[in-house]
Amino acid sequence: MALIEAGLVDQLKNDLEYDVHYDGQVHAYTVLLPRSDPDHRNMKKPRGVSAVTQQLSSQVYEHAKEGRFVLTLGGDHSIAIGTISGTAKAMRERTGREIAVIWVDAHADINTPETSDSGNIHGMPVAFLTGLASEKAGAPFGWLQADHKISVKKLVYIGLRDVDRGEKAILRENGIKAFSMHDVDRHGIGKVMDMALGWIGSDTPIHLSFDIDALDPMWAPSTGTAVRGGLTLREGDFIAECVHGTGSLVALDLVEVNPHLEEQGAAETVRAGLSIVRCALGDTLL
C-alpha cells in the first residue's frame, strides 16, 4: 500500500507509459486464512500460507498466460511460492520453456521444513519451488505440481550475506549459483551481473524476485530482517537495469518493504522500492 500511495502505479502509467491492469485494491487475503492452523513439519501457519500462495499463483498465471508482465508487491518472501509458480506454469504453456529466477536477497530462503530453525515459511520458498522440499497431495503445499517448479540450474542468487548452515549445504550439494556480497565486493556488480546472466543463458525468460533487504539498511532500513553490509541502492538499481536490458524479464516481485518497522526510515525504504521497480521496467537517467 505504501508503494502505491507513493505513486508507483501512476509512475508506471504516466512516466513509463505502461498499460497497467490493476483492480485498485491491496489484497490481504484474510478470508483465505483458516481458523486453526497448527504447525506441520515444523512449518508455522502452513495452511494459511499455502492458501494465499495458491491463490496468488493462480492470479499470476492468469495474467502471465496472456503475455503480460506481472509485477507483484509483497509481503514477506513466502509469496514467491505463488508468484514464481504461476509464472513458471504460464511460460511453459505459452512458450514451452522453463523460466530462470534471479533471487536478490540477503537470505537464501532455501531451507526445507526440516533444516529450518525458525519454522518460518518465508525462509523456505525456494526449497518448495525447486522441489528440494515437497509434499504429498492433500498436504498444505501438495498443490505444487511439476509445471509450477523451477530448475536449480536456472536459479541465481545475488547479494547473500546471512545464510544458515543448512542452506549452505543445500547450495553446495545442488550446485546452485550464488553470488554473495563478498563476490560483489571482489568483482564489482557489473562483473557479477555478466556472470549471472551468462549462467542463465541468453533469451531465457527471467523472473526477478527482489527482497528490499538485499540493500544495506543505510538505503532500506524499514524491513523485517535487515542485515548490514548489503548492496547500495545504485547496485540494486543496476541489477534491475541489467535484467531489463536482456529483454527477457517477464515478472518481478518486490517484497519486504514495511514502513511500520522503522518509521524514521520508512520514506527512504519506499523510495528505494520505487526505484528498483522503475529500473526493472526500463526507467533511465537519459
Image: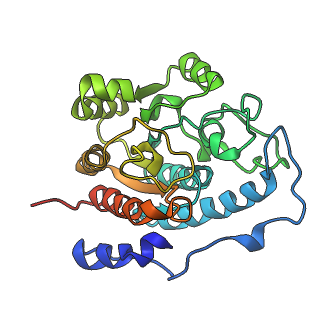
Q: Residue furthest left?
A: 286
Q: Give whichever of 3, 129 is nearer the camera.
A: 3
Q: Residue at x 41, y 53 (%)?
A: 220
| Visible residue check, residue 216 | yes
Up/down of 166 relative to 123, above or below: above
| Visible residue check, residue 211 | no
The percent coordinates of residue 201 (x first, y second) are: 33, 33
Q: Answer with the quarter of the image where residue 131 lies.
A: top right
The percent coordinates of residue 134 (x first, y second) are: 73, 37
Up/down of 158 relative to 232, above or below: above
Q: Residue at x 41, y 59 (%)?
A: 269
The answer to whether 75 appears left or right of 143 in the picture is: left
Q: Residue furthest front?
A: 264
Q: Answer with the quarter of the image where residue 115 lies.
A: top right
The percent coordinates of residue 166 (x first, y second) are: 65, 23
Q: Residue at x 17, y 59 (%)?
A: 284
Q: Residue at x 32, y 46 (%)?
A: 236
The answer to whether 73 appears left or right of 250 in the picture is: right
Q: Give whichever of 49, 198 is nearer the camera.
A: 49
